[in-house]
Image (tube, helix red, strand yellow):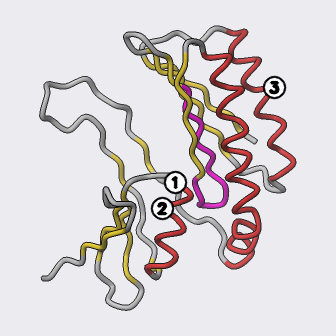
Amino acid sequence: MKIEITGRNYTVSEHLKEVTEQKLKKLDKYFAHDNTVARVCFKQEASSRTTEIMLDYAGKFVRATATGDNFYDNIDIVLPKIEGQIRKHRTRFDQSSKVSAYKEQAVFFEEKPVKQGKVVKEKSFALKPMTVDEAIEEMELLDHAFYVFLDAKTQTVQVLYKRNDGDLGLIEPQI
């Protein structure tokens, strides 16, 4: 597993890097392929510290975050979360990696400090055709509030989102 460690408003110490890499190596047992990438981001804010881990495995993303007083405790909190997600979706990961190999990698851009009301992060990714049910599963894997996908039937871009009442909504554009 390749591990990328970054810090936002924080300089990551060598000891923290070593501890993080050592603990993330325990997740290797879930991945047979060497193309797994773990991105770890340590963010220091005014009164809190947030640790975010995102795993990229064969085109699938699993993400978990923890916020607390120090980064070492956050690692111990976030690892069981991400390990639970991996176990939950492990058979789905294995099946999808056998069916189609991961072809394109998402392109990430660094966040840029800008004035309020401006775009602060840009991200581009390839859309693959999928059903609404598959999009729901992907959104749950990412633990996001929305998911953009290409509908397999209509070949249009659609947006799936979580509503405040816990249900899901689907935006279908008309051209």
**Left or right of 28 on screen, residue 140:** left
* Marked residue nearer the N-terminal end (3 or 2): 3
Q: Secondary structure at mark 3?
A: helix
Any mark on residue 22, and which? 3
Q: Residue at 68% of width from left, 73% of height from top?
A: 96
Residue located beneath label 1 in the image: 142
Q: Secondary structure at mark 1?
A: helix
**Residue depth check, mark 3 versus mark 1: number of the one nearer the observer:** 1
Instruction: Find the magenta span and give its range.
Output: 51-61
Residue located beneath label 2 in the image: 139
Of residue 74 and residue 110, the one placed in the foreground of this image is 74
Quarter of the view holding residue 2: top right
Q: CA distance from mark 2 to mark 1?
A: 5 Å
CB atoms at circles 2 and 1 under 8 Å apart? yes
Count the numbered circles shown: 3
Q: Quadrant of the N terminus?
A: top right
Of residue 97 and residue 138, the one placed in the foreground of this image is 138
Any mark on residue 58, and which? none
